[in-house]
Image (cartoon, grey):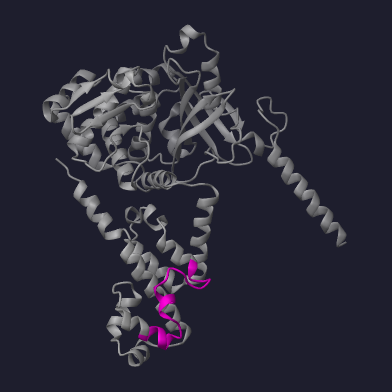
Amino acid sequence: MVSYTRLYIDLKLNTMITENESVRLILGLKLRNLRQQRNLSYQQLSDATKITVSYLHDIENGKKYPKTDKILALGKVLGTDYDYLVSLTGDKKLQPLIDLISSDFINVIPWEHFGIAPASLLELFTNTPDKVTAFISTLVKISRAYHLTRENFYTTALRSYQDIHNNYFEDLEVASRKFREELSITETLPVSVHDLEQALKEKYGILTDRKKMGSISSLGNIRSYYSAAKKILYINKQFSSGQEAFLLARELAFQFLDITLRPFETIVQQPSSFDQLLNNFRASYFAAALLIPEDYFVEDIKSISGNDKWDPAAWLQLLDKYNVSAEMLLQRLTNILPHHFSIDQLFFLRMSGSEKEGYEINKELHLSQLHNPHANLVNEHYCRRWLSVRLMQDVQQLPEKKKNKGSLIDVQISHYWQTHNRYLCITLAKPKNKNSHETVSVTLGLLLDSSLMQLMRFVNDENIITRTVHTTCERCSIAGCKERAVPATYIVKKQKEQEVRTALEGLEQ
């Protein structure tokens, strides 16, 4: 088995800044600032305080914390008092950095996963404090103003982490293949719920309970929960066999990869750390790779993409072939397309809601760049010309007896207003669940470039609709849009601002 727990613990011990380290760093920061203000070298300060040069160097770099008599001696030479040196306050230039060191902010961001150690970061800040600390201060203030939480940082960092790796992880692909071999299902498609349930029971002694969670109303939005003490995986009711297969495969991933720093519920409520969220992602990736094996899926993509015409039935058949949800199918494409076909200019969006209550983007992934469609935090109305919105509206208009018969699928070429960007968008939509009036859609957007057109020959199908789209109605200047949900208030505001600027310029003439 592969064990990642020790690695993650070691990483956190080596990179997190503890409270004691924070106190040492703040003292060192103040001493360096005062020494430099007085143009004193280490040797000059050493001669005046009788403290060795090496020890002074360690103090300034936060490695040592001197005793009271040495702090008093340093304060006397540097023209300050003991209370200032040991306090958590500093002058105007230093305070932003002191606030950063004292806050959780520096430990919220998973620096180590991007090859950065917080201590090295602080050394950079202390060497060039003015502009860098002002920038960090701005980030902290933005996080407060927009109520950005730890969860926001963790999720955004995870998406960036996926982007850096092109959302493909060779070690998890290899591990999933090894596990299929252990289960003797290398030629089996789809992987059955029964086989997965038996594997949990026989290999790890874990039983499955599908009754208890369903009887507790407050757990309606929790899909599953693993009790390590009882060795029981509780699964909520009203899930398709494909959704159940994913929940079982995800639990098998935690067990097989020996991941102990993990969430026990699905969907994760409040991740305690970035590593916990990353481990959850790794288990989900393993589950998808287990249910949609890489080699088989690559051949399917080649086969479907080689058609000259868009064939929605062929795409829907993949859901049955692998017995997976639409979301898993499209997310699996974000793993395979960049690695095997060099198609890495893409985005993935999951939306939910209704025309009456509004639509919300609740998951997004961008590879290679920040693409045009994206979530916004200003409560605006997403473009009704998006295929994802149109297909969700189509689901709502279906007769009740047909709404839960399966996913609707369609394709559209979206040309973003006043840009050169054109995307092939593939969307699947369905009711959120049998008892909900909301609809959910998942969209894979692929930038139309030479790599895509070479792979997916059906992009030239004349029956595929091309539409000019925008991001939100409020920011859209497309004239005469029949799908507009609200007026272009942002555009009107900008026009009025321009009129004021023009009038002011007229006063100078």
Image point 14% across, 26% down: which residue? 183
Image point 31% across, 65% down: which residue? 20
| 161 relative position to 386: left or right | left
Residue 89 falls inside the magenta stretch: yes
Evaluate whether residue 290 shows in this view: no
- Residue range highlighted in magenta: 73-95
| 138 relative position to 318: left or right | right
Q: Is residue 227 above or below residue 503?
A: above
Residue 160 falls inside the magenta stretch: no
Foreground residue, 9 or 240?
Answer: 9
Q: Is residue 482 above or below residue 264?
A: above
- The quarter of the rendered structure image containing the C terminus is bottom right
Residue 74 position within the rendered picture, expressed as x and y whole percent measured from the top left: 37, 84
Q: Is residue 57 above or below residue 3?
A: below
Foreground residue, 265 or 200?
Answer: 265
Foreground residue, 368 or 436?
Answer: 436
Foreground residue, 134 or 20?
Answer: 20
- The quarter of the rendered structure image containing the N terminus is top left
Residue 137 position within the rendered picture, expressed as x and y whole percent measured from the top left: 51, 61
Residue 100 position within the rendered picture, expressed as x and y whole percent measured from the top left: 44, 62
Give the image quarter of residue 186.
top left
